[in-house]
Image: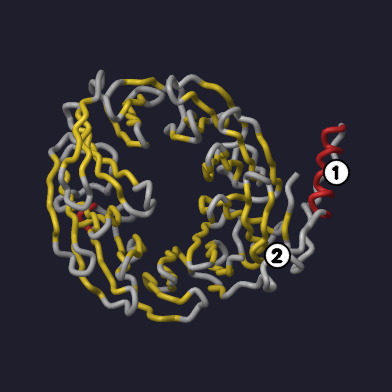
């Protein structure tokens, strides 16, 4: 049973659905009625109205350090960047240099912009850093692609002379990487990787928004891990039985996942020894950790759980093809309620990663990829309307704590931080978290 915690702001009930034959459907209706009736009264101590709303023309937003950075478009021009407080007060505004310039990230005292978007040649891209408090430009580096923040440096890739659109898959030219000072753009280190080397970037476990390692897979089959702060190689691991036809790779915890041209699924290696552990012989998305002793991948027929040691399939959940979060041994999955969902059915599922059992099902809601502790940000859009509810879903209990009501799209992009949740879709709306 899913419990909807509304406080005393609204009277929400599950959407009307046609009655189907059979006891199973009757049981579902009984559960829906009970879920609507068992409301609790410990909602947030306000009426759930947004702190503020930008009605339209919003492209993207970043939330960092109590400030909201927004990218907006304008008729007859490329648009503007804005900085606002989470309450909506405008701090500064400046024009975008072009339609392909967007927000990369905010960290420390800088806001970093990147123009490596669209179909232009890579060398037309550029990286720009602004003072987050004033919007003043600190530095600009042409022919550069922003990779991300790495502690005291910003990681860039120099793409001078690269005339094709930018891509990180495959590499037949040398790759020049730089770690630069966030406020001055001065290089702290500069390394060029040889042609034939593939590069992947691993997030930090302690700080997910910061790069934890630069991973290089050489043409000879050796995985080299580099410290992104210094650019220095920290470990070297030859991968056994690697051979050729490698298209891409990633490092996930203590495993290396290698994709091959012409092979339906990737190979999975042990990071420490370089030993080939197993091969995924099925078409689908790249496998990833989804609980203790479990890996998952999403295929055309649903979500599949694998034994982490052997790659053997241990469970399947059909129909749904979106995994939004993994919290311990619980997976938050479901459908977005649009063409990306196999069922076209807005629903949130809690799945036990050990067994594949669906422990909770929340119909009519859509999950996002954003969490607040163990809870996922979820939304419920009114039928035929671009407005609805935003809430926090606990996969352990199936309970939703409603945060607020306002403008929402059918599959919004949300951010959290500084005690608020921000959702994009039908403009931008900010609510205070309970």
Vertical arrangement, residue 399 with respect to residue 233, above or below: below
The foreground one among 341 and 377 is: 377
Q: Which residue is at a point 84% across and 49% down the rendered structure image?
A: 33
The earlier-in-sequence mark between 1 and 2 is 1
Vertical arrangement, residue 374 with respect to residue 81, above or below: above
Point out residue 234 in the picture as x, y percentages from the top left corner: 19, 40
Query: Residue 75 shows which numbered tag?
Result: none
Q: Which residue is at a point 32% across and 77% down the rendered structure image?
A: 135
Vertical arrangement, residue 180 with respect to residue 3, above or below: below
Point out residue 144 in the picture as x, y percentages from the top left corner: 21, 57
- Horizontal side of 253 relative to 367 (left or right) equals left
- Horizontal side of 355 relative to 201 (left or right) equals right
> Disc 1 to disc 2, how far (Cα)?
24 Å
Mark 1: few/some/many CA within 10 Å (<14, 14-19, 20+):
few
Point out residue 265 in the picture as x, y percentages from the top left corner: 40, 25
Q: Report if the CB atoms under discs 1 and 2 are less than 8 Å apart.
A: no
Q: Quadrant of the C terminus?
A: bottom right
Q: Quadrant of the N terminus?
A: top right
The foreground one among 334 and 292 is: 292
Q: Which residue is mark 1?
A: 30
Q: Which residue is at a point 51% across and 30% down the rendered structure image?
A: 299
Q: Secondary structure at mark 2?
A: loop
Q: Which residue is at a point 15% across and 53% down the rendered structure image?
A: 160
Mark 2: few/some/many CA within 10 Å (<14, 14-19, 20+):
some
Q: Which residue is mark 2?
A: 43
Point out residue 389 in the picture as x, y percentages from the top left corner: 66, 61
Q: Secondary structure at mark 1?
A: helix
């Amino acid at each position: 049973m899913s419990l909807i915690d509304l406080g005393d702001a609204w009277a929400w009930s599950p959407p009307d659905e046609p009655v189907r034959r059979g006891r199973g459907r009757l049981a579902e209706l009984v559960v829906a009625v009970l879920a609507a009736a068992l409301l609790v009264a410990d909602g947030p101590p306000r009426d759930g109205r947004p702190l503020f709303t930008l009605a339209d023309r919003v492209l993207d937003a970043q939330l960092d350090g109590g400030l909201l950075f927004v990218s907006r478009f304008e008729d007859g021009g490329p648009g503007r960047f804005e900085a606002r407080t989470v309450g909506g007060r405008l701090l500064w505004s400046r024009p975008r240099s072009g339609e392909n310039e967007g927000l990369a990230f905010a960290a420390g005292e800088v806001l970093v912009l990147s123009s490596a978007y669209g179909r232009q040649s890579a060398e037309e891209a550029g990286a720009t850093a602004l003072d987050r408090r004033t919007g003043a430009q600190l530095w600009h580096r042409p022919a550069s692609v922003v990779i991300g923040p790495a502690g005291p440096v910003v990681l860039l890739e120099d793409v001078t002379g690269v005339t094709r659109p930018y891509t990180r898959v495959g590499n037949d030219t040398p790759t020049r990487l730089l770690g630069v000072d966030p406020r001055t753009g001065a290089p702290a280190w500069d390394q060029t990787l040889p042609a034939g080397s593939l590069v992947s970037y691993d997030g930090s476990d302690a700080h997910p928004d910061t790069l934890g390692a630069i991973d290089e897979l050489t043409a000879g089959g050796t995985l080299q891990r580099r410290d992104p702060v210094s650019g220095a190689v920290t470990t070297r691991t030859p991968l056994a039985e690697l051979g050729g036809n490698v298209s891409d790779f990633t490092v996930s915890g203590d495993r290396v996942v290698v994709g091959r041209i012409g092979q339906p699924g990737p190979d999975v290696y042990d990071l420490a020894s370089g030993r080939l552990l197993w091969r995924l012989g099925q078409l689908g998305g790249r496998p990833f950790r989804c609980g203790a002793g479990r890996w998952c991948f999403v295929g055309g027929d649903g979500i599949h759980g694998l034994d982490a040691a052997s790659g053997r399939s241990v469970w399947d959940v059909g129909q749904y093809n979106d995994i939004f979060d993994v919290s311990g041994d619980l997976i938050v999955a479901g459908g977005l309620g649009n063409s990306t969902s196999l069922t076209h059915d807005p629903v949130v599922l809690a799945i036990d990663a050990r067994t594949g059992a669906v422990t909770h099902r929340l119909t009519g809601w859509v999950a996002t990829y954003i969490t607040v502790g163990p809870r996922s940000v979820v939304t419920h859009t009114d039928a035929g309307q671009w407005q609805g509810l935003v809430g926090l879903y606990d996969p352990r209990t199936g309970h939703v704590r409603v945060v607020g009501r306002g403008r929402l799209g059918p599959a919004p992009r949300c951010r959290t931080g500084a005690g608020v949740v921000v959702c994009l879709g039908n403009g931008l709306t900010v609510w205070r978290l309970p």
